[in-house]
Image (cartoon, rainbow, N blue to C red):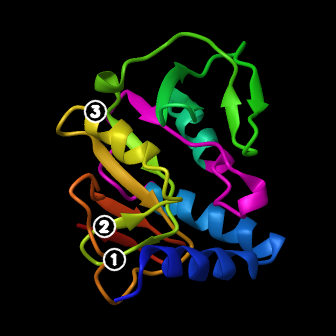
Amino acid sequence: MMSKSVLRKKYKAMRNELTIQQLDDFSIAIANNLLKLPIWEKRYYHLFLTIAEQKEIDTEFILNILAGKDKDIILSKSDFEDSSMTHFLLTDTTKIRKNAYNIPEPVDGIEVPSTKIDVVFVPLLAYDSNGNRIGYGKGFYDRFLAECKENVIKIGLSFFPPEETLLTVDSTDIGLDFCVTPEQVFEF
């Protein structure tokens, strides 16, 4: 079994090898595959904004789908003191700024409690065929998902297929319901 730190390095390296064109094509393919999921009758969708420097999936395509379907889009601001996240409704007046970690975040706005959110698009580095994920290791999303309602739909987004060997799971790790790649949709 590979350790989480080894897997983090491996997937960061794999992402770094992607060209700008591939990032774009894969991000569009992921957004299109999301349309196949039974999630579109919900109201509150939590989305992360892309850290371009980390070669993350470009979530702007998903943002456009959500806006086109007139959904309420929730963005978060991270507090690195206590690893918590505050959630804000995206509106026409929302100002976005990059924090010290290059994460684009809302400056402030209308706060939305975690318990209201119906669907969460979850960033990740690696995941396995059981829906366990490895993020950047700060635990922001595990804490946030633990505050959400029990039936919140958790959707991982990845350029790559699942790890063949199962990931080590901590008691605080929260698994995914789906993971969407450019090629296919995995359901757990």
Give the residue number, with chain letter if any, for mark 1.
Answer: 128
Look at the image and tell me whether residue 40 can be seen: no
Q: Residue 81: x, y in percent?
A: 55, 31
Q: Residue at x 45, y 43 (%)?
A: 140
Q: Position of residue 31 (x, y in %)?
A: 55, 57
Amino acid at pointer 2: Asn
- Crowding at dot 2, Cα within 10 Å, few <14 / some 14-19 / many 20+, comes out as many
The picture quadrant where one finds residue 21 is: bottom right
What whole-number distance in Å separates the C-alpha atoms at marks 2 and 1?
A: 6 Å
Q: Earlier in the sequence, mark 3 or mark 1?
A: 1
- Name the secondary structure under disc 2: loop
Is residue 179 at least partly visible in the picture? Answer: yes
Residue plotted at (21% across, 56% down): 171
Label 2: which residue?
A: 132
Disc 3 to disc 1, how far (Cα)?
A: 22 Å
Residue 77's place in the image compared with 3, above or below, is: above
Residue that label 3 marks: 148
**Quadrant of the rendered structure where residue 102 is?**
top right
Please report the bounds of the magenta region as a residue range: 35-61
Q: Amino acid at mark 1?
A: Asp
Q: Which image quadrant: the N terminus?
A: bottom left
